[in-house]
Amino acid sequence: MAHTKSLELLDRWRVLRCDLDAYGVRLLAVSKYAAEKDVVQLIEAGQQDFAESRPQQLRDRAQHYPTVRWHMIGPLQKNKAKYIARHAAMWHSVENIDVALAVARHVTDRRLPVLLQVNVGRLAHQHGVRPETVPELAVAVNEIPELQLVGLMCMAPRGCDAADAFACLRGLREALMNGSLCNALPQKLALCMGMSHDYQTAISEGTNMVRIGSGLFDSIS
Ligand SMILES: *Cc1c(COP(=O)(O)O)cnc(C)c1O
């Protein structure tokens, strides 16, 4: 996507949307480092989904811009659980039951849609639940009335083949859909995979949502 970086923000956004709309893939604009004016520009252009990794910034922006959806990505500590429970449209980084329960305690008038973050490469320094633990955590999360399991999320490990990582996540989804959870789930589980440098690969591997930050907000000029 390097060739789009010389374009203006709105042009980069349009190019991306064209790419993604053709496949019915939802764009999450990762605005964690984005300037306020750039966020406003995208909202005015019609961008509906934004993703933040810092809970307070998510809360602040969700309060300022309540007409669009604010997704939580990245690790979450229990003491920030209330911000996500109250303000996130979707929480993409569930990796253990304790934090999930902490968030659930603050959810009041809805079921918060959540995704399990999977450490597909089983790397010690990466966040997420290990592939072999996914079924167990999926069942446990799905039993929490305030949360609704809607999908799986991953980041391709650096230096590995992104296609392999994404295929692994898709395989885990199939296993869940065909396993004991199949009757408990209201819908087909979604896949959230693909970032600026590997979103094309994620599309080929059947992603439903991509998370694009630098490829959208960073320009080279
Ligand atoms: C920052 C971040 C992104 C965006 O990455 P880019 O390479 O800037 O597109 C995507 N997913 C997660 C979990 C992130 O923390």
Image: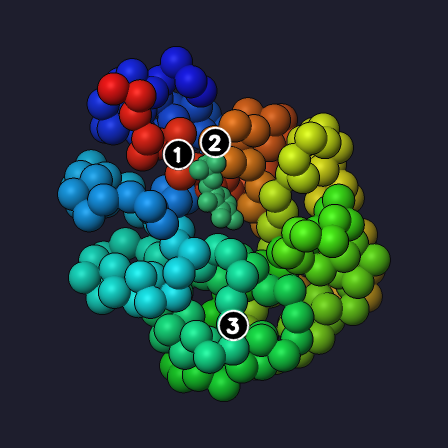
Q: Which residue is mark 3?
A: 77
Task: Report the amino acid beneath label 2.
Answer: Ser
Q: Which residue is mark 1?
A: 214
Measure the C-alpha gap from mark 1 to mark 2: 6 Å
1 in relation to 181, above or below: above
161 in relation to 79, above or below: above
Q: Earlier in the sequence, mark 3 or mark 1?
A: 3
What residue do we see at 37% from left, 42% from top? 29
In the picture, measured across the screen, residue 179 lies left or right of residue 95, that is: right
The N terminus sits in image quarter:
top left
Is the Cβ of the residue at disc 1 closer than 8 Å to that at disc 2? yes
Q: Label 1: few (<14), some or many (≥20) within 10 Å?
A: some
Give x and y (percent) for residue 185: 66, 64
What residue do we see at 23% from left, 28% from top? 10
Task: Report the amino acid beneath label 1.
Answer: Ser
Task: Report the amino acid beneath label 3.
Answer: Gln
Q: Label 2: few (<14), some or many (≥20) within 10 Å?
A: some
Is the Cβ of the residue at disc 2 closer than 8 Å to that at disc 3? no
Q: Earlier in the sequence, mark 2 or mark 3?
A: 3
Q: Which label belongs to residue 196? A: 2
